[in-house]
Amino acid sequence: QAVVTQEPSLTVSPGGTVTLTCGSSTGVVTSGHHTHWFQQKPGQAPRTLIYDTTNKFFWTPARFSGSLLGGRAALTLSGAQPEDEAEYHCVLYYNVVRVFGGGTKLTVL
Amino acid sequence: QVQLVQSGAEVKKPGASVKVSCKTSGYTLTSNYIHWVRQAPGQRLEWVGIINPSGVTTTNSQKFQGRVTVTRDTSTSTVYMELSSLRPEDTAIYYCASDHYDYWGQGTLVAVSS
């Protein structure tokens, strides 16, 4: 089974910009992997921010955006807020089977 | 409004089976997918399986080696995830989620302990 990798932890200053990435052991991440991004705070269920690589839900703050970058899927946060401190997960699609990454703990400090 | 409501926490002994339900409202199972995802304490999210609008299921067979069964009852708008031959490492919160993971159940804690 493929392995999906994320940065274990990142730190961003309030108001700053940070990019989280999601890579695949099988090679380049493409739109065909239908990347989803989730935010999870302690004790809560995940909340989906981005679906199908770039699409947002109505509840997704405008400061979050999804893209493909350097062979990986990327989640960019522009103008970080204290409430953005959380764990961020990605999931990739591999011909029906989905595989989650290990998550990135984002600190806003 | 879409809602996914899961059954309550379960405590099981190793080797037993558990069946978790996910009752949907405002969500047509014959037109949409339902995913099952789990999260062990302090661990990553793990994809368990999916049931498609036709009722066809796909599971994470490499991880669960045939121990997972996903079924549904369209008359009650409920999806079920059954995990057999439970092991202590199956202790986790099990979630159901909609098509694009836009709606999630509240999670069901399954604890496996002798």
Image (tube, coloured by chain):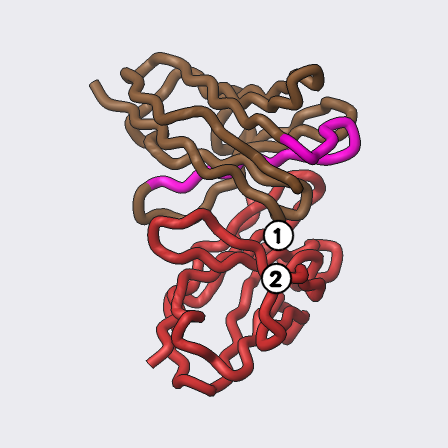
Chain colours: A red, B brown
Query: What residue do we see at 44% from left, 36% from top?
Result: B107
Task: Specify few, some or many for label 2: CA neighbours under 10 Å numbering under 14, 14-19, or 20 or more.
Answer: few
Residue picked out by circle 1? A92
Instruction: Measuring from the top left, give residue A15's x and y in whole percent.
Output: 46, 87
Quadrant of residue B108 within the rendered picture: top left
Query: What residue do we see at 62% from left, 56% from top?
Result: A36
Instruction: Measuring from the top left, give residue B63's x and y in whole percent.
Output: 48, 33
Query: What residue do we see at 65% from left, 17% from top?
Result: B76
Pick the front one: B105 or A87: B105
Using the image, tell me which numbered label, if any, was put on residue A48: none
Is residue A4 depicted above or below B105 in this figure? below
State which region is magenta.
B25-40
Quarter of the image that includes the C terminus of chain A = bottom left
Secondary structure type for disc 2: loop
Closest to the camera, between mark 1 and mark 2, is 2
**Identity of the residue furthest to the left in this view:** B114
Instruction: Measuring from the top left, give residue B9's x and y in whole percent.
Output: 35, 26
Quadrant of residue B49 within the rendered picture: top right
Amino acid residing under circle 2: Trp
Residue picked out by circle 2? A59
Quadrant of residue A49 within the rendered picture: bottom right
